[in-house]
Image (cartoon, rainbow, N blue to C red):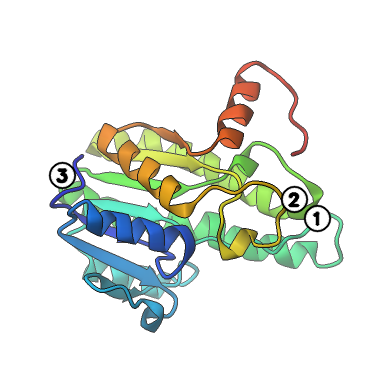
Amino acid sequence: MKIEGITALVTGANRGLGLALTRALLERGARRVYAAARDAASINLPGVVPLELDVTRADLIEAAAERASDVQLVINKAGLSRGSSLLAPAAGEAFRAELETNVIGPLAVARAFAPVLAKNGGGTLVNILSALSWVTTPRVATYSASKSAAWSITNGLRHELAAQHTNVIGVHVAYMDTDMARHAPGPKARPEDVAAQILDGVEAGVPEVLADDVARSVKQGLAQGVYLGAV
């Protein structure tokens, strides 16, 4: 799929990687970009179509699928991290919130837009996952669990949508220089660099994008059967 001339939708498009993806889509010549966020007024990038979309609300997801009925590329970027360990007092609440936004929400978006993508030739669905889909740390253990579930769902969607010629891409990346990871130590990938790799992957039709050295190292360790209990 070539980016030039297509119509795309990005959830969580008002900041961080979502904003970087939206800008990159415009720069590569996308015909129309729906920039979705819980508060559509927070979208102030010229040239996009702001769209109200909270991935935890079925009514807004269905409304978005009706409004953006011409899309060929859907990028599930919206995400949430509560920064909780498994045994923290509020771990149950944190995990439920992360599951709603990181797992159930993207699945609901995929289910709503699958018929749209099929009608428009198949297209591509991108789910933003994490290197923490495969490893964990106590600081973000509930988040890691939610991303592991999202990885499994991404793989399932790839099988189920293949018949309608929809390519499903899972994106794995460690910490990025965004608000979500502002308190995390260590090196962080630039959202612009990650966005470029994702769109390269869309154009190449790959099933997976490993967007930084950490994600590539973790995937290599898994392939070699190395236990990666924490990062």
Nearer-N-terminus badge (1/3): 1
Furthest residue to the top? 224
Residue beneath the point at 19% across and 55% down: 30
Dot 2 corresponds to which residue? 141
Q: Amino acid at mark 2?
A: Ala
Identity, as a three-letter code, of the amino acid under mark 1? Ser
Left or right: where does residue 30 sit relative to residue 127? left
Q: In the rendered image of this protein, does residue 66 appear above or below residue 22?
A: below
Asked if marks 1 and 3 touch (Cβ < 8 Å), the reply is no
Which image quarter is the N terminus in? top left
- Residue 198 place in picture, x, y as percent: 38, 43
Amino acid, disc 3: Gly
Secondary structure state at the residue bearing disc 1: loop
Q: Position of residue 108 (x, y in %)?
A: 43, 59
Q: Count residues near mark 2 (Cα–Cα under 10 Å), then give few for <14, some for 14-19, many for 20+.
A: many
Q: Residue at x 57, y 34 (%)?
A: 213
Q: Position of residue 74 (x, y in %)?
A: 32, 54
Q: Earlier in the sequence, mark 1 or mark 2?
A: 1
Q: According to the image, label 1 marks what residue?
A: 85
Q: Which residue is mark 3?
A: 121
Is label 1 in contact with label 2 (beta carbons under 8 Å)? yes
Q: Is residue 139 left or right of residue 219?
A: right
Task: Name the residue: 58% across, 65% down.
Answer: 179
